[in-house]
Amino acid sequence: FMDDFCKMTVERFDGSLKAEHATGRNIAPFLELEWGPRATELMWRLKQIIDPDGVLAPRIVLDRDPRAHLRGLKTIPRVEAVADPCIECGFCEPTCPSHDLTTSPRQRIVLRREMMRQPDGSPVETGLLDAYGYDAVDTCAGDSTCKLACPVGIDTGAMMKDFRHQRHSPREERIAALTAKNFRAVEAAARLAVAAASRIDDRLLEGVTGLARRAVRPDLMPAWLPEIPGAAARELPRTSRAGASAVYYPACVNRIFAGPEGQHAPSLPQAVVAVSARAGKPVWIPPDTAGTCCATIWHSKGYDTANAVMANRIVAAAWGWTAGGKLPLVVDASSCTLGIAHEVVPYLTEDNRALHRELTVVDSLVWAADELLPELTVLRRAGSAVLHPTCSMEHLGDVEHLRAVAEACAREVVIPDDAACCGFAGDRGMLHEELTASATAKEAAEVNTREYDRYLSANRMCEIGMDRATGRSYYSVLMELERATRPGPGQV
């Protein structure tokens, strides 16, 4: 086939044998066909002068073997089904938060294939297995942006989550399921712990959590970060179901952690309630949101039983809150919107899957841009704002909604060229600080080339990650929208 193909290309169409790639092993035997013996001999003479021992890129470009393209063919052993279609093109690599730290999605798959090539118990296989846990599984953010970049939609993040599941002991799975079943108490305890921690010296907390991480396991015990905010208010804003245009679901992270200014400024839930009412689209917060969650906490760690417990709980609850889907469910964290709208589905019972189909899950950015902005009057605008689009926004297609809301609040809006997933990934940035440090390095360097009046995003944990990376204070664009439209002194 290659003989006929190359002759047709060169002799019939006077074409080139290369387009995207250069002359590699596959084309080397046909170099003379394309360039002719005189030019090819000139190349060989130059090669012999510069590289007489043939140590530079051997058998690449220049190779006298007429069947070089059939020699040493690469094998593609079967691995996990999700990764089998990979042709190792590398489109995924620039999107991966860990590609400058440990491995990229392509490398994770290549290493798995090399494991399969190795005989059982070989030194190479043993070394790969020892390194793979940290280099591939632990430092994967699980953001699945690799799936968006991959020409055939390979989700290497999902494969890493499955590996996390496989290495859990039955006891760990039971404990995780217990936390899901009793999440109301877990949530309250987390809020109390954050409140107590805010009164303790950061260095002491860093030391204590560091000791605990060594005693337990770094991938299970989070480290304390000075950027972690104080506790959110115990009570959510009072709202009414009567006349509500939507059900507003404050994500558990916003029920646990306060905003960047603590409780001295309107919280995110207060801001969403206020700005929705201001636009004539009041929202209702159900009184029994405590103890519910989008299930991403367990999904990202591969705790399948716990994930299923919470996935079914939130869908059943949301169906009731929205009167069987008659009202949209507005979620104020992009990762939680993605979780409820899409990621819970495989873990639902058949009955709850039917209920899920009746739900309309709306990210707060979409709610603000499409429903609120047309009804609001902007009274004051900041001079400039820099945005951090999250990986969940990329999956949901919400980045332009983030920009639209920000442009209503600031005269100049910038999305850094190097903006990408921050790698904080819920709490993974607290488990492996180096992941977020590496993932945000280029974006943070770009952000810090100048001063901005506002630093905006729409996911609390990602905001904490960007705070740590840049030394700035990121917060939700919806809080800025509330400030920009709040009645009172101001100038556009």
Image (spheres, rainbow, N blue to C red):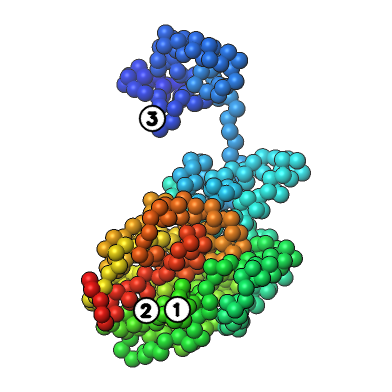
Q: Nearer the viewer, mark 1 or mark 3?
A: 1
Q: Residue at x 32, y 19 (%)?
A: 14
Mark 2 surroundings: few (<14), some (14-19) or many (≥20) residues within 10 A: many
Amino acid type at circle 1 is Pro
Does residue 488 sit above or below 221 in this rendering? below
Return the residue at label 2. Answer: 272
Residue identifier under label 1: 250
Circle 3 SS class: loop
Q: Is residue 423 left or right of residue 34?
A: right
Q: Which residue is mark 3?
A: 19
Q: State the CA–CA distance, disc 3 to disc 2.
A: 52 Å
What's the distance in space between the residues labelled 1 and 3, CA to CA?
A: 51 Å
Instruction: Work out how far the residue at label 2 is from the one at label 1, CA to CA, in angstroms.
Output: 9 Å
Residue occupying image coordinates x 58% and y 77%: 198
Mark 2 and mark 1 in contact? Answer it, CB < 8 Å: yes
Q: Is residue 15 above or below residue 177?
A: above
Kindly indicate the quadrant of the structure image that contains residue 453. Answer: bottom left
